[in-house]
């Protein structure tokens, strides 16, 4: 089946709040998912990402706007008329049906004949590595196995689009990484248009072609992972994706910004005297021995050894900066209280609009 | 707001299965709930096309009606207090006595037997015991012409019949009070009595209020017991309304009297559901029961409590034994030689009533079960305009005393356009709409424990609303379905208050035959009928319990409780 695209045009969902009155869960969300693309909706809880996904699925009815799947207007169509495969956070396996019957459910509803159901279910269970589990009941399976049954059930009837609602959040960390690879490779192989919801930025970056960041019911920024990380549109995006220092500075000349007494060579394109915010990721700052390069810019407050890197908190004037050092296998660690010099990789740093 | 409402309308209209179900349920509710009620009100308050309060005021001015009103309230209050006390005794013993499993089974059996029996059982036994020729009054005490009829015997019979409701209400509450709380109080130096008084009792207060109101309502609505036992000296509202209609053919008077009964009944129902029902301090988590062994009650108190429970249970057992003996002797008290004659009578002369009752129960049972899960599903799961109204209307016939419902049905379906009186349909409908709300509530409770995403998963896999209901929802709420079946069946076998107005020559009920036997003083056949009903109900309940147990329903106590509409 040829992949289809999904278009959301100014979609809104309101609900009545007992105290606040009418509240927008989702407001004027417009986005499009290309054929075969895996798009992730990313944001903190309550940002409207799940509601958006549920409107695409048809579990929620939008109050405004239109939803098109493969060019067909499905805004108010029932979920069973949309050709979607949906994976729930809690898997939502039918507790009274066996693994086989769970996976076969969609095919039986379509009225497919027995042998072809049998074949399709056997194939898809093999695909997710559950060939021997046909007769088991859901409650006999581990979390990861239930998850794979849910995945098999969502893809077996060849839906037009796949929708994932935080499918991995109930798994432990290691299994989560394993499962997201499996989902990603399955999606690539089938080439099916997919919308994925998560609050985990690492998961989003690992799995997506493109990410849509949402906050308080609206889309804040969309783009590939690199764009969101290096060119965040707002402080919210900068802080939500990865760790960051937001440096508050003042433009002193066309190519220079003053931050807490330090002068950084950054071209902002702003007028002299304008206040700016600069996104500096912890790995864009380097520590040096304060004695070697005078004067010392700051002082180490805390040090955390994390194996592949060492994190420092460095006080500079009134603020603290987060710094990550990955070359710690090659040098002596800095001690708490030690005066240190700072070197900024200004080319990678980003000025917020 | 408007947009949201229109979205709800649009969804409903765009979904044929949902629309069909909603419209279907409303048609049924209109015909079998609202239409009879409207007729009842019209009969009571409209005269020559004009609204009038005259019949109501007239009725209230009648001293005998006023006495009946006061008597009803006095009786209901007494039964509420005594039944709650008795229920608390049983509940405390079961939840805190640290008794073995066999003792608990025994307590449960003694408490549940009265609830599944036909309404006259205790009354008949009381007459056998305390009547002019009674086993205790005449044979043992040698009293001549003891008078059994009146307030005391009625209150005793109703207390014994309804105290299980208090037991079922209070036991989970006591069991859910964490023994750690009591042990904490003990460790702080309080005596056992002080701990009981200052910790256990206050935590059980909402349970007391709830239990009192439930018993009050049950007694207020009880029709069969006062009809047998109250006699002329102690008239109550349901029997007065019945006599007004069957004795005097005064439909208007009966309608007015039943509406006077409506006021306290509705007040108690609302109080119980919307005030007390929401004020429990303890939440039932499902983990309780294991920790019931506690040192908060002294061993000699446990012995005392157990002794008291055994005494009450012995009284109940004695009444049932008496009933069985009376059904097997020629004339109890006068000629105590063994005979099967009474059973011969009920299976020949009484056979039509048995056949009709079983047919009606067999038709009503599946209909009531399906109706219960359907409405429960709509209320718990679907979003459609007028949902709350549907929930309330569906509860009306359940909440009202049977006398009111019976009179309303009689008035509404006696004449065209919907002349149903005399047929089986009207009796079946009466049972279905009066006793399915238990199934509705069971279905709602069960659905609230099933994640919505399971049904959404079905929809995402291409199943329509009807298919999802049939393939996923229905199997998952099967326990509620069977509980609903059980309640409708039991009540179809044992109820009388509403359907006594609806029987005819063509369709007769066992309970009505028992009443006729009682008034003809044919006590032997009445006892035989009662024994028959108890046996049938017991077999069916046991069968359904087995089915429920296989469906991994909650504990057996929970199953039994769900049958009783607690």
Image: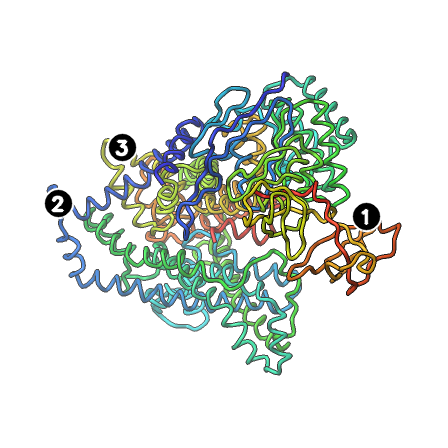
- Residue A326: image tag: 1
Q: Residues within 10 Å of mark 3 (few under 14, many from 20)?
A: few
Residue at numbered disc 2 = B47
Of circles 1 and 3, the one toward us is 1
Residue at numbered disc 3 = B418
Query: Which residue occupies the foreground of this view, B344 or B229?
Result: B229
| Residue B374 percent across, percent down from the top left | 46, 37
Q: Chain of mark 3?
A: B
Q: Chain of mark 2?
A: B
| Residue B182 percent across, percent down from the top left | 60, 73
Q: Residue furthest right?
A: A330
Apparent side of residue B499 relative to residue A15 in the rendered image (left or right)? left
Q: Chain of mark 1?
A: A
Query: Which residue occupies the foreground of this view, B257 or B234?
Result: B257
Q: Secondary structure at mark 2?
A: strand
Q: Secondary structure at mark 1?
A: loop
| Residue B364 percent across, percent down from the top left | 43, 37
Marks 1 & 3, CB-CB < 8 Å contact:
no
Q: Residues within 10 Å of mark 1 (few under 14, many from 20)?
A: some
Which image quadrant is residue B24 in? top left
Apparent side of residue B441 relative to residue A294 in the rendered image (left or right)? left
Q: Secondary structure at mark 3?
A: loop
Of circles 1 and 2, the one toward us is 1
Measuring 59% from the left and 65% from the top, which residue is drawn there? B95
- Would residue B28 be visible to someone looking at this image? yes
Q: CA distance from mark 1 to mark 2?
A: 95 Å
Q: Residue furthest front?
A: A253
Apparent side of residue B292 relative to residue B348 in the rendered image (left or right)? right
| Residue B222 percent across, percent down from the top left | 36, 56
Apparent side of residue A64 relative to residue A177 in the rendered image (left or right)? left
Measuring 32% from the left and 62% from the top, which residue is drawn there? B230
């Amino acid at each position: 089946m040829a992949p289809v695209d999904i278009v959301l045009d100014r979609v809104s969902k309101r609900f009545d709040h007992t105290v606040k009155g009418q509240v927008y869960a989702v407001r004027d969300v417009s986005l499009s998912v290309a054929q075969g693309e895996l798009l992730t909706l990313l944001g903190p809880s309550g940002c409207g990402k799940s509601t958006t996904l549920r409107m695409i699925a048809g579990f929620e009815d939008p109050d405004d706007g239109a939803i098109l799947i493969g060019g067909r207007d499905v805004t108010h169509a029932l979920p069973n008329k949309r050709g979607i495969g949906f994976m729930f956070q809690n898997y939502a396996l039918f507790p009274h049906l066996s693994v086989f019957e769970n996976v076969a459910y969609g095919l039986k509803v379509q009225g497919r004949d027995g042998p072809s159901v049998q074949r399709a279910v056997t194939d898809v269970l093999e695909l997710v590595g559950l060939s021997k589990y046909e007769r088991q009941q859901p409650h006999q399976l581990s979390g990861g196995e239930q998850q794979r049954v849910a995945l098999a059930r969502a893809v077996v009837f060849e839906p037009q689009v796949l929708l994932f609602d935080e499918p991995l959040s109930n798994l432990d960390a290691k299994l989560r990484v394993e499962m997201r690879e499996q989902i990603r490779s399955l999606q690539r192989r089938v080439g099916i248009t997919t919308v994925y919801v998560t609050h985990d930025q690492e998961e989003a970056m690992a799995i997506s072609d493109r990410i849509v960041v949402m906050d308080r019911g609206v889309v804040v920024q969309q783009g590939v992972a690199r764009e969101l990380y290096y060119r965040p549109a707002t402080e919210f995006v900068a802080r939500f994706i990865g760790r960051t220092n937001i440096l508050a500075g003042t433009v002193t000349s066309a190519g220079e910004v003053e931050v807490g007494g330090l002068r950084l060579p950054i071209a902002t394109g702003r007028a002299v005297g304008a206040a700016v915010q600069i996104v500096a990721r912890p790995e864009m700052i380097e520590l040096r021995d304060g004695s070697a390069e005078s004067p010392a810019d700051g002082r180490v407050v805390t040090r955390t050894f994390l194996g592949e890197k060492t994190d420092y908190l460095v006080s500079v004037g009134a603020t603290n900066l987060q710094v990550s050092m990955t070359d710690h296998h090659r040098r002596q660690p800095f001690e708490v209280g030690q005066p240190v010099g700072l070197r900024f990789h200004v080319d990678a740093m980003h000025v917020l609009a | 707001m408007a947009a949201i409402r229109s979205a709800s309308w649009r969804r409903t209209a765009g979904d044929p299965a949902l629309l069909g179900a909603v419209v279907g349920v409303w048609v049924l509710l209109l015909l079998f709930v609202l239409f009879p009620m409207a007729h009842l009100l019209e009969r009571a308050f409209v005269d020559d096309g004009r609204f009038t309060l005259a019949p109501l005021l007239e009725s209230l001015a009648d001293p005998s009606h006023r006495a009946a009103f006061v008597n009803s309230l006095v009786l209901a209050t007494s039964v509420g207090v005594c039944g709650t006390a008795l229920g608390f005794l049983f509940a405390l013993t079961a939840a805190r006595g640290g008794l073995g499993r066999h003792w608990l089974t025994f307590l449960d059996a003694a408490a549940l037997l009265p609830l599944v029996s036909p309404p006259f059982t205790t009354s008949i036994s009381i007459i056998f015991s305390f009547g002019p020729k009674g086993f205790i009054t005449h044979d043992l005490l040698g009293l001549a012409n003891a008078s059994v009829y009146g307030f005391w015997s009625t209150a005793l019979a109703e207390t014994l019949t309804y105290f299980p409701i208090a037991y079922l209400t209070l036991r989970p509450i006591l069991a859910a009070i964490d023994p750690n709380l009591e042990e904490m109080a003990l460790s702080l130096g309080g005596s056992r009595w002080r701990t009981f008084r200052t910790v256990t009792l206050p935590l059980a207060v909402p349970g007391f209020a709830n239990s009192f109101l439930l018993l009050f309502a049950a007694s207020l609505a009880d029709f069969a017991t006062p009809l047998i036992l109250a006699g002329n000296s102690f008239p109550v509202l349901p029997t007065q309304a019945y006599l007004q209609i069957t004795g005097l053919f005064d439909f208007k008077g009966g309608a007015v009297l039943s509406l006077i009964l409506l006021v306290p009944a509705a007040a108690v129902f609302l109080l119980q559901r919307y005030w007390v029902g929401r004020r429990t301090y303890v939440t039932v988590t499902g983990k309780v029961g294991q920790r019931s062994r506690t040192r908060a009650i002294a061993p000699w108190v446990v012995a005392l409590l157990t002794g008291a429970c055994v005494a009450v249970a012995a009284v109940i057992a004695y009444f049932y034994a008496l009933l069985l003996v009376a059904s097997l002797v020629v004339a109890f008290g006068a000629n105590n030689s063994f005979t099967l004659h009474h059973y011969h009578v009920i299976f020949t002369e009484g056979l039509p009533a048995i056949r009709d009752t079983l047919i009606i129960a067999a038709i009503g049972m599946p209909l009531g079960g399906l109706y219960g899960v359907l409405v429960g599903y709509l209320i718990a799961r679907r979003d459609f305009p007028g949902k709350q109204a549907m929930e309330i209307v569906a509860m009306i016939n359940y909440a009202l005393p049977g006398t009111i419902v019976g009179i309303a049905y009689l008035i509404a379906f006696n004449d065209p356009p919907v002349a149903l009186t005399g047929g089986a349909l009207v009796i079946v409908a009466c049972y279905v709409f009066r006793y399915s709300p238990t199934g509705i509530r069971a279905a709602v409770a069960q659905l609230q424990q099933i994640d919505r995403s399971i049904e959404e998963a079905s929809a995402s896999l291409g199943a329509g609303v009807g298919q999802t209901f049939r393939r996923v929802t229905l199997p998952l709420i099967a326990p509620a379905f069977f509980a609903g079946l059980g309640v409708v069946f039991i009540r179809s076998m044992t109820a009388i208050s509403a359907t006594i107005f609806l029987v005819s020559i063509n369709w007769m009920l066992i309970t009505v035959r028992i009443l006729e036997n009682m008034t003809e003083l044919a006590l032997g056949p009445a006892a035989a009928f009662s024994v028959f009903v108890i046996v049938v109900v017991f077999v069916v309940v046991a069968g359904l319990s087995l089915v429920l147990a296989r469906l991994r329903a909650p504990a057996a106590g929970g199953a039994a409780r769900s049958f009783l509409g607690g």
